[in-house]
Structure formats: structure tokens, C-alpha cells
Image (spheres, rainbow, N blue to C red):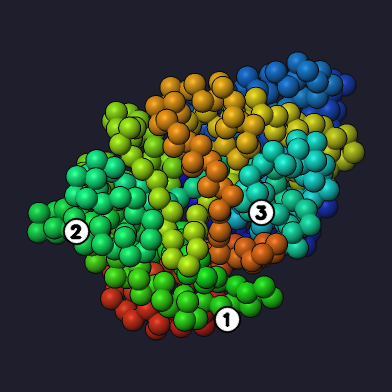
Amino acid sequence: MKAKKMIFGTALAMVALTLGACGGGSAKDEGKTTIEFMHSSVEQDRLKVIDKLVADFEKENPEIKVKQIPVEEDAYNTKVVTLARSNKLPGVIEVSQDFAKVMDKDELIDQKAVGNVMKKAGEDNYYAGAKKLVRTEDGSGYIAAPISGWVQGIWYNKATLSEAGFSEPTTWASVLEIAKHFNDAGNKKYGIAMPTADSTMAEQAFSQFALSNGANVLDEKGKVTINTPEMTEALKYYKELSQFTMPGSNDVTEIKDAFMNGSAPMAIYSTYILPSVFEEGKADDIGFAIPTNKQEAVYGTVSGLTISAGLDKEQKAASEKFVEYLSEAKNMEKWVLMSPGGAQPVNKQVVDSSSYQSNKVISAFGELPKEIASSFDKVQVFGLVGDKNFTKMGDITSSGAISKAVNSATVGKEDPEKALKTAQESIEK
């Protein structure tokens, strides 16, 4: 699963107090307007794709020069903070949905500029759920233009389940039944590979079950609602299910390894499992299910392109034009296919594209890629309540209170109600 970037709310808040006009690169360079573009694609094969996109854009727009700032993902948000402190924030920045919330809360995003891009790109072309993830807190605008994303669910080996007489594991009851059936810890065989570590992944996985049970971290007024009967029921179920996973604190590596080596016929993971499945020649035998109790709930995340506040008129216009260019379906497709199968299109035009469908990785999975992409319309995340997308959810996640509750209940065997009470008190403070 692709790492989720850390959040530096406090540092950015300090920056916001002193931030004037952002840098965005030198305004004029040999008669051209120069803008800076910060992104996390540092790998050579990905850089070649972005280099070509930038070169093509500059050819179409000779009055604009785009200076790239590729930054390793682990250092990404720290770099944003550092640049913001020195009033040198790039004009265009690739952001996760959570970090975009933190930047928006600290008034570092030009919402109007992003909104202009979305209108020109065609809002209706995006999956509704993907748009919700990058809405402003009041739901009236946008804090980033989505360019790709990934979703999480239950991946399962179709042949293994079918041979044992099981169909798709969609309900809480069926997931638990299948996990019990295949669990044989004495022979290092487990019913399901699932996150139990004190990590962001554990919060993400647990959130799907909680939201499918009608539980959320915040209510429509933004009040913390972790210690509720619905949330407690979900954590009790998650704890029971964890009896049939590998012992100890499991995170990204342990879960992927267990599913790929056949130790578990089901796994809770993101779409970043698919490239490995393709490489193993098992594309025909993997299924995708959405945890369902009272309702379906898909956890999803979006990467977007945002435009910094404080740019001068020329840089703002150039930044809008560049993000509009990258938001064209043909260019979004190139961006997504830098990691085929892992990164998912959030734009319906990309999904319907014959060139996207004919990609050797995408085509190997048959109709599954369309099923996965359409699940963006079912995306639910903690802190997204109706049309409200609470920015403080980013700070709640970064506090680690929810993932600690999951770890305490599963690995630590703590009573779920007690673990959630502790989380509620911690976040309220």
C-alpha cells in the first residue's frame, strides 16, 4: 500500500501566520512566466513520463516555463513546510487529500484557482466520491484537482474460496465465516491478512467497517463521536476478525506477503496489491469485495494537484493552465499508468478510454478495473459527513489516537469500549 504522507498541522499553522506572497519560482525568465511544480515521482521511469508531459505543455504554451521539484515521499510534507516558511511555496503542488486539508486550513491554497480548473476540466467527468474527498470543508469548492487515487477493500483468491464452497465475502458475517474456515495457525495458515499495527493503515482498514456500520469520527457539527455504540460494535467485530490473522502487529509488508504467498486467502489492502498479482500471473484469480453491514463502505484516497495562495497574476494564470493541461483525460491517463493497477483513475473518461483498457496490466484483470474505479462513488472516510469535509480530520489522523485504539483492542486484547473511550478523550483534549 502506498505510504500515506504524515501531516504537519502545527508547523503549517505557524507558517500561515507569516506567509505573504508565495515564491512559485521567478516570475519572469527570458520573457517567460516560470512556475514550480512539486511532486513525489522521483523514480526514473516516472520522471520520464512527467518530463514528457511538461515538455509537451511548454511546447503548447511557449510563454510558460515549468520547473520541476521532485521530492521523496518520506520527506515530502517536511519540504512543503520548509518552502512555506521561506515564502517559496511552489505554484503547483501534488498533495494527498489529508495534507490538502491541512494546507487549506492554514490558507495556503487558492480555492478559486482550483475551482476554475475543475470547471474547465468538467466536474461531471469525475467520480462523485473522488470529488468529495477534495471538497472544501463546507462543500462549496475544491482544495485540489484529483489526478489519481486508490481504493481499499477485501481482496480474495476466487479459486480457493470457490473450492471450499464460498462466494464473494461481502458481508461482515461472510467475511468472518470464511476467515474461521481457513484459519490454521498451527500450520501458519490464516483466514485473513489484516492490519493490526499502530499505523495509519490500521485506521484506514478499520474505518471501512466502522463506516459500514454507520459510525463516524465526527458528526455533522464537527463534534467528536468515537465512543459510540456503533463504533464499539465495529471495533468488537474487527477484534473478533483479528483472531484469524497473523499474530503480532501486522502492517503493509506482513499483509501483502501473507496474501501473495498463499498463507491467507483474503487480505485488506489497497489497489497497490494488483501490480504484484499481475507479476505473479494471478490476474484471473483475484476478486475485490466491499465490507458491508448496514451499508457499503469503500475507503479511498485521492492524489490531487493544488495551486498555492499568494501567487502573482501571471503565475496564477500559468499554474491554472498547467493543472488544466494535466487534468485532460489523455494526460491523466499517462499519469495513472505510471503505476498501472496500483494508481486508479478518478475520471470516467480515462476509464472509458480504449488506450487505458488495452494497457497490458489493466486488460489482464478483465472487468475488475472498471469495478474498482466505479467504487470511488461509494467512498466514505472518517470526517466526511454529508457534504461537509472537516479539515480537522487530518489532525485527528495524525494524532494516532484511532490506530492506537485498533492496536490496543486487537494486539493488546483491550476491551474495545475502553480503547475507544481513551481515543475519544485523547482527541477531545
Within 10 angstroms of label 2, few (less than 14), some, or many (20 or more) residues? few
Quarter of the image with the C terminus is bottom right
Question: 174 and 191: which one is in front?
Answer: 174
Residue positioned most to the right = 313
Q: Which mark is residue 188?
A: none
Residue under numbered circle 3: 132
Q: Residue furthest left?
A: 186
Q: Please tell me whether residue 276 is drawn above or below residue 396 in the rendered image.
A: above
Q: What residue sits right under mark 1 in the picture?
A: 429
**Which of 357/106 is in front?**
357
The image position of residue 43, as x and y in percent, is: 49, 29
Q: Which of marks 3 and 2 is in front?
A: 2
Which residue: 84% across, 21% down?
63
Q: Is mark 2 on a helix, strand or loop?
A: helix
Find the distance from the CA under tag 1 to the CA under tag 3: 28 Å
Q: Mark 2 points at which residue?
A: 181
Q: How many labels does the image show?
A: 3
Q: Are marks 3 and 2 in contact (CB under 8 Å)?
A: no
Q: Where is residue 78 in the image (x, y as percent from the top left)?
A: 58, 50
Of residues 205 and 290, the one drawn nearer to the viewer in this rendering: 290
Q: Which amino acid does label 1 sit on?
A: Lys
Neighbor class of circle 3 (other Cα within 10 Å; few <14, some 14-19, many 20+) is many
Please tell me whether residue 330 is drawn above or below residue 235 in the rendered image.
Answer: above
Residue at x-position 47% and y-position 81%:
229
Q: In this rendering, is residue 219 above or below 380?
A: below
- Give the percent coordinates (x, y) of residue 306: 71, 44
Say what amino acid the circle numbered 3 marks: Lys
- Is residue 278 among the parts visible in the rendering? yes
Q: What residue type is labelled 2?
A: His
What x and y, as percent, mark residue 187?
Answer: 9, 54
Task: State the separation of the CA atoms marked 3 and 2.
Answer: 38 Å
Which mark's residue is nearer the viewer, 1 or 3? 3
